[in-house]
Amino acid sequence: MTLTSAEPLRATSRRGGFARSPAADRLTRFAVIAVTVLALIYILLPVYWMVKSSFQTSFDIRAQPPHWIPREITFQAYKDMGYIIPIWRYILNSIYVSAAAALLATLIGASAAYVLARFRFPLMTLFLVMILATQLIPPITRAFPIYSAIQAAGLLNSYTGIIIAYAGFSLPFSVMLLRGYFMNNCPPDLEEAALVDGCTYFSAFWRIILPISLPGLAAVTIFTFLNAWNDFLWASLLLSQGEMKTVQVGIGDFSAEGGGGRYINLVMAACVTATIPALIMFLFVQRWLVSGLTAGSVK
Amino acid sequence: MERQKRLFCYLMVAPAVIFTFVLGLLPMITSLGWSFLEYDLIRVQQTGTPFVGLENYKEVLSDGRFVRSITNTFLMTGLVIAFAISLGLVLAHVMHSNYRGRAIVRVLICAPWFVPPVVAAAIWMWLLNTDRSPINALLMDMGLIDSNIRFLTDSSTWGPFSVPLLSVTAVRAWNGLPFIVIFILAGLQSIPRDLYEAADVDGGNLWHKFRYVTLPLLKPVLGVLIMLLLITGIGHFEINYIMTGGGPQDLTNVMAVYSYLQAFNFFRFDLASAAGGVILVLTGIICALYIRGQLKNRDDR
Amino acid sequence: MSTMVRITNGWRGRCARAGAALAVSAVAMGAAAPQAFAQEIEFWTQSYGDLIAWQRTMDELTSEFEEQSGIEVNHELVNWSVAFNRWLTVAQGGAAPDCADMFWLHSFSAIGGDEYGPLPINEYRDRWPDLEAQFYEGSLQDVNWNGDFYGIPWRGDVRPLIYRTDYAAEAGLEGAPDTWDELVEHAKAMTVRDDNGNVTRWGFALGPDNVSQAYVPYYWQAGGLFMTEDGRTATIDNEATRTALTFIRDLVWEHEVLNPDFMERGHDPEADFQSGIVAMIGSAPGPTAPTLASDFPELDGKWALAIPAEGPAGRDAYAGSGYFGVLRGSDNVEECVQWLQFLSTPDSMQRLSEASGNVSPMRDVMASDFWSDTEWKKTITETLEHAHTSQHPSPVWNALVSPEPGAVIYDMMYEAVIQQQDLDEVIARAQERMQSEMDRAFVEE
């Protein structure tokens, strides 16, 4: 794989296509830096606007033309938001639901991905196609059937219902990623050796494969977590009542389009608050995220 | 031993299969079933849901609005993928290189991930609202424009393109960027350093390294990524719905928004399901190709 | 372990309350045989006015009621942004409360049929012997459908005109426009352009961000009605539609006082009014004035309300409404009715109106000091005289006036006003579509 890919490079260089050209490199670097700066403005603009608005009064937010920098900074929105949006409770709900779903999806996904990567057995193609095919169903088209199913199971407005739903939705992605991971990073000799040593298939998987696959498992867990954390549609359908709401629904309830709405500064303050846990988590796990993916996605 | 192994395999896949069946296949079949019934919420209590064959599909496909939404769906998905991946390639390199402050840059680039998408769309609407846009205000001050850009409402078109279409595309790309960057970054990290060193020896400049080392080696990663983005992009709903509701004049209308409006605004679950059915067929074709690729991967080993 | 403790405590609490409930009910019902009452009912309201004040009022009312009856009311706030989908789900058999603050009776009862959604409570009708005397007549129309009685009206959303008095003074105008012609004049005078000719302040906006709702009063003012009284025949192919659409079209293109983007998503006249980029809204929804009064002290004395300007046939004001009713599937109808009785006392109605800022369908409340202590409140009370209910006797009404492309009224406005297509063709097409939509609701036997 690596050899063939590097081939064109050699071929070209032999034809003398490459010349050392620091000038060209400088140009490339400059272009990359320029693009990055522009991209960062594009990426951070809404984030800045969110943070800025959370420190403004209702009137200042409405100022026309808009103030890029608040005239006066007030923390009132942060003091008031708790009355209207029980944000900390929502954050805890979200963390619980997302973490449980992430662990469940990773565990189930890893089991399936492992045997689908390693063994051949009747119906396995069918299973694989089925699991991967669920990815193609647009959420909109299955919203009502799933709502009915969750309701019929008596799991509407319960944490269990939404955890199961999230885990289910993330499965195709976790199976896909982990299957790649197991195929690329766990040499078959490993568990063969274990089996010879008298391990059962399951204990080989549990004791040997899972521990050495931690980076991949972590990456999948984080993705599932973030997907669940950011979901609005399902949470608004399945867990929309009372204190159990997730952050997305709790805040979404109050967010009016286009900066309208009565409590816009409180909503922004709540968003900033809700962003912090996700951000902190990301700071801790970003290394795992990338390294896990690296090993899984590329052969 | 063989039987034991087989049993093990089935036990291991069983939970995943059950989950995907209940939360994926079953609802999909139910929804497909609806598309062949009359399922009008206003009438359902009196008439029930009689079978009507392909009527709903006929009605949906003869609705000019829906047909336009198919083109828009593919156009926007394509644009989002092209734009976000090109930008993602640059940003992934920036995250990959070594320099002081890299950790901060990484977090900043991933920032959109942490802003609740519903709120992000609302903030973008605010930033792009013709009269209230701070961007317009800034550009006016700088003398770069002499009338407000109607980011989300300008209905003049060049071919299939329009300002609102590009604006919504930009927001969707913004939303997907962190995932894409991380995905590509993972791919970059798996490229052995010695290949670049080899390129150095051969006298390649940065562009050459990218063109002849990075890009070919990233191909499999990009392939998977594009497939994922295609599938999620074709069914995409939230940002289009929140920001424009499909307007102005259907310029940003996509299939999922059409389907949603049929169900929730006009109480026609049958037409919504038929529109969903069309989305399914289209994504199905792409997905079939994708799964074939996945299976081939396995057989290659 | 902790869950166990909570459960047992919960049970003990419930048993104690059950005893109290029995005792109270025996007293309350007089001779009636003591019934076993449910101790808890679930009750939803939408959010109104100042949310903190609203929540506090609901807390007070529920605890007073519990003290009096022994019935615990679990109140849950449903935000407006999700209310519609939530109620649509309820009408289809989704999770429902026992009773609630509801709206759109006609649509939701048609969708729910005899199984889900609003429950008729005809047999409890005599619990309110003075209903006609106490409530405005129009509001009672909104709680009856197909000959059944569904609950107690409690709020109105009557929409006056609002304008910036400082901008009006600046333009040398006095007071609010009284007629459509004056409206055009005022709007022109208050519209401001920059050096490049771009409008920096629009003289006029039709109504709320829901453009279909915004259109409705102008059609009435032009003398039109949307359908026959039996709700079976669409009646929009007429001169009134032509007049209303021409009026709006001219506001946009001839007088250039109405933002041509007013039909697009994200157009928010209320926010624009607060920003000072809209000088006047012809049909301002209920919360507009209370919000300005409480959240925008900077604008004090710079705005005023007025009765909507008079069109060729009148000065009808859009009036939405809401009612308290019971849901099908509830096992606690009796308890719900008691709660409704409690909520419909003059005292409760007064508090609900004050906390929510909504006008009350109860005459006494509107005659109270609260509704006459400021100029704008007086104007709202005066506007009530011109209130025209927005309910229509067809279950598809809400589909017809959905503010989205694809809805009949929206498409008609868009084609006529924004795209300036031939009026006759647009209207004929709309009439035909509206009729076929309305026919959905009537199944040929």
Image (cartoon, rainbow, N blue to C red):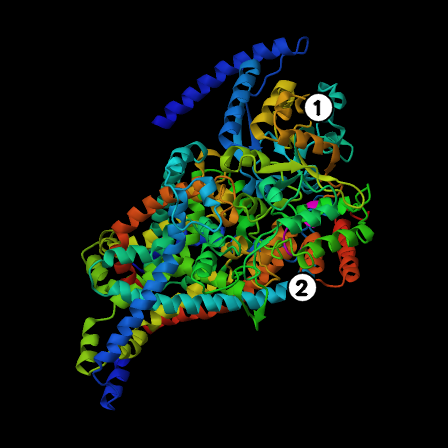
Q: Is residue C397 magenta?
A: yes
Residue, disc 2: B63
Q: Position of residue A160 (x, y in %)?
A: 43, 40
Looking at the rendered image, the quarter that the C terminus of chain A falls into is bottom left
State the predominant SS element of the stretch in magenta: loop
- Around disc 2, counting alpha carbons within 10 Å, would you say few (fewer than 14), some (14 to 19), or many (20 or more)? few
Q: Is residue B139 magenta?
A: no
Separation of marks 1 and 2 at Cα, in angstroms: 49 Å
Chain letter of disc 2 in the image: B
Q: Position of residue C328 (x, y in %)?
A: 64, 33
Instruction: For residue B284, say whether it is visible.
Output: no
Q: Amino acid at mark 2?
A: Asp
- Around disc 1, counting alpha carbons within 10 Å, would you say few (fewer than 14), some (14 to 19), or many (20 or more)? few
Kind of element beneath mark 2: loop
Rendered image: mark on residue B138: none
- The segment highlighted magenta reads C396-406
- The residue furthest front is C172
- Residue depth check, mark 1 versus mark 2: number of the one nearer the observer: 1
Rendered image: mark on residue C363: 1
Labels 1 and 2 within one chain: no
Q: Nearer the viewer, residue A224 or A265?
A: A265
Residue ID at (35%, 57%) = B9
Name which quarter of the figure residue C341 lies in.
top right
Q: Position of residue B270 (x, y in %)?
A: 65, 55
